């Protein structure tokens, strides 16, 4: 007997965004001595002036909870009505159970579907695509998507290639059904031939030997990642716009993963974005927060430019794997992000 089920085939959109930024601000002057560098060198290479580091009392879960509660409040949606929670992170310190299950218990809906995804800096955009498809098919009505990292726990403070880049924070969005299209098709994929460009080493198996007990740190081939992001991601962004029926000329905002300022500006130039397009450059004061960077940058941009509420934006994440995902979206309406 055949299944009797008709997909809803409805639209979806981001209803609200929330963010959590640790209060501890780390200027470049606190980084330079340990990596034999200078504030000027860091600014020229990355555009970063400062970043946020979580304190000992702040965790992946506590930061996620704060961002989610803000998004829920702004959306007017009760946590009891949330059907699924997706957490994108690479810094939750437990292999299992997931960060998402710990989070839903704190948020008050322990029965919701909950799972983590590991797609590094592309994780949030992966989550947005998955949540949109869950809603469009009828498997969920409301989905919380979280991007969160505590990268300060996994960054070698003496590594000249990464110590000044990575930071901590959380961002979350509520995605729900919509009468009109609010999230375009996801353009996603990988370039696994460059898998070694960003690594966390050693593996947990390596650490099983007490004689070599240590702690994993992130390593990165900076030039390889830079070239890949600049030359390979701009076409992906253009594909995402075309899939949603948009062009650079009809776009209102560009919110890329906050890798560094040079990558952001180079991508915008490669896509030939007009000057009318608002570009998120939160990396200047927040650093690279991996999976959290897109929603945090979205929240910052809407705070700086409230006129962008309800307007179109291109979001794109890319990182270790190497993996990527991009979507054209409509930003949350003004009433949902106060």
Image: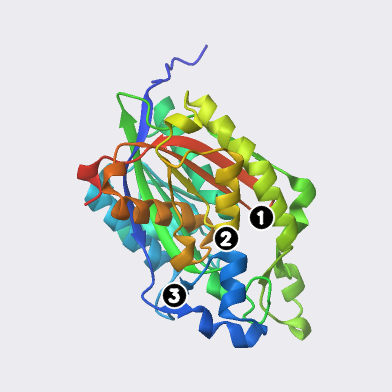
Where, by quadrant of the figure, is residue 32 drawn?
bottom right
**Residue under label 2:** 90
What is the x, y in percent for residue 33?
61, 88
Residue at mark 3 to residue at mark 1: CA–CA distance = 22 Å
> Is tag 2's residue or tag 3's residue first in the polypeptide sequence?
3
Q: In the rendered structure, find residue 320 and report the number of the disc placed on it.
A: 1
Left or right: where 43 falls relative to 200 = left
Residue at mark 2 to residue at mark 3: CA–CA distance = 15 Å
Indicate the colouring scheme: rainbow
> Is tag 3's residue or tag 1's residue first in the polypeptide sequence?
3
Where, by quadrant of the figure, is residue 14 drawn?
top left
Q: Residue at x 42, y 16 (%)?
A: 6
Q: Residue at x 58, y 65 (%)?
A: 46
> Is tag 2's residue or tag 1's residue first in the polypeptide sequence?
2
Q: In the rendered structure, find residue 95 and report the number of the disc placed on it.
A: none
**Residue under label 3:** 54
Left or right: where 262 falls relative to 69 = right
What is the x, y in percent for residue 178?
31, 28
Q: Nearer the viewer, residue 299 or 204?
A: 299
Numbered disc 3: secondary structure:
loop
Numbered disc 2: secondary structure:
loop
Q: Nearer the viewer, residue 19 or 175?
A: 19
What is the x, y in percent for residue 269?
58, 44
Residue at mark 2 to residue at mark 1: CA–CA distance = 10 Å
Q: Residue at x 45, y 42 (%)?
A: 275
Crowd rating for badge 1 (residues with CA inside 10 Å; few <14, some 14–19, many 20+): many
Where, by quadrant of the figure, is residue 211 drawn?
bottom right
């Amino acid at each position: 007997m055949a299944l009797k089920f008709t997909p809803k085939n409805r639209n979806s959109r981001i209803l609200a965004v929330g963010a959590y930024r640790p209060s501890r601000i780390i200027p470049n002057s606190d980084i330079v001595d340990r990596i034999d560098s200078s504030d000027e060198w860091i600014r020229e290479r990355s555009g970063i002036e400062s970043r946020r580091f979580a304190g000992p009392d702040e965790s992946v879960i506590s930061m996620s909870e704060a961002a989610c509660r803000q998004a829920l409040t702004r959306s007017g949606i009760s946590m009891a009505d949330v059907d699924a929670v997706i957490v994108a992170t690479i810094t939750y310190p437990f292999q299992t159970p997931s960060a998402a299950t710990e989070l839903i218990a704190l948020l008050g809906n322990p029965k919701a579907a909950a799972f983590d995804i590991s797609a590094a800096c592309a994780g949030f955009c992966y989550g947005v695509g998955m949540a949109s498809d869950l809603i469009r098919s009828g498997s969920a009505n409301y989905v919380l998507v979280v991007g969160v990292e505590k990268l300060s726990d996994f960054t070698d403070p003496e590594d000249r290639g990464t110590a000044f880049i990575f930071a901590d924070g959380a961002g979350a969005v509520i995605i729900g059904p919509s009468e009109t299209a609010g999230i375009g098709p996801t353009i996603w994929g990988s370039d696994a031939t460059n898998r070694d460009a960003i690594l966390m080493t050693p593996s947990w198996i390596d650490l099983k030997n007490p004689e070599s007990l240590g702690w994993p740190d992130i390593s990165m081939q900076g030039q390889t990642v830079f070239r890949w992001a600049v030359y390979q991601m701009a076409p992906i962004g253009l594909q995402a716009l075309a899939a949603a029926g948009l062009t650079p000329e009809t776009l209102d905002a560009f919110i890329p993963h906050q890798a560094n300022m040079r990558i952001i500006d180079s991508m915008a130039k490669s896509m030939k974005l007009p000057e009318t397009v608002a570009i998120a450059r939160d990396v200047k004061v927040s650093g690279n927060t991996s999976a959290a960077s897109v929603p945090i940058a979205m929240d910052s941009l809407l705070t700086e430019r409230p006129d962008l509420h309800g307007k179109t934006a291109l979001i794109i994440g890319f990182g270790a794997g190497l993996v990527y995902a991009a979507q054209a979206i409509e930003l949350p309406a003004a009433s949902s992000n106060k």
